[in-house]
Image: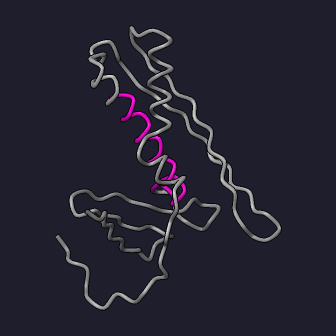
Amino acid sequence: MATNINITNLPTGYQSIITNGRHAILGDEPIKSKGTDLGFSPTDFILSGLAMCKVATVRFIARKHKLDHLIRDVKADLSMQVARAKDGKLTTTVTVAMLIEGDVTEEQKAKMIKEADACYVHRMIEGDWNIQSAVELTTPIAED
């Protein structure tokens, strides 16, 4: 099943109302990019998706192995650096540090963190992408 996102850009800064049909969030650009900084930037959203997938995977693995009662908080700190080569191609480096709080062994933590590196979004980002060129929208987006 396809994932669908609808977005409406507002005239103020670069504010955008982003919806998946069930939830809505505000996106924007930082002040230095002439936005109003009232929402996550596009790169914030990319990194957030990866971060959420990783912490959710740790929680999933804990439940799968009946360790969830031993896990309290699962936290992650992600950082993203983008470099532009002379040919204009971008190379992105993401660093990830994770903290699993609870009464689990170091070996169990290491296993869960390793599983987090195989989360769906991580594998998706590392996989092949085919982003088609935009076309004009000919029918209005349904407002819920």
Q: Residue at x 52, y 27 (%)?
A: 98
Residue 138 quadrant: bottom left
Left or right, 6 with respect to 124, comes to left
Position above or below: 135 against 56: below
Left or right, 54 with respect to 128, comes to left
Q: Residue at x 41, y 74 (%)?
A: 9
Image position, residue 4 (x, y; %)? 30, 67
**The magenta segment:** 39-59
In the rendered image, residue 132 lying in the magenta stretch gets the answer no
Image position, residue 17 (x, y; %)? 35, 66
Q: Residue at x 44, y 15 (%)?
A: 108
Position above or below: 118 against 84: above
Residue closest to the far left: 144
Residue closest to the far right: 86
Residue 66 quadrant: top left
Image position, residue 120 (x, y; %)? 41, 46
Position above or below: 6 against 74: below
Q: Where is the N terminus found, in terms of image quarters? A: bottom left
Left or right, 35 with respect to 143, comes to right
Q: Majority secondary structure of the magenta segment?
A: helix
Residue 21 quadrant: bottom left
Marks counted in the figure total: 0
Q: Where is the C terminus found, in terms of image quarters? A: bottom left
Q: Residue at x 25, y 56 (%)?
A: 23
Position above or below: 90 against 60: below
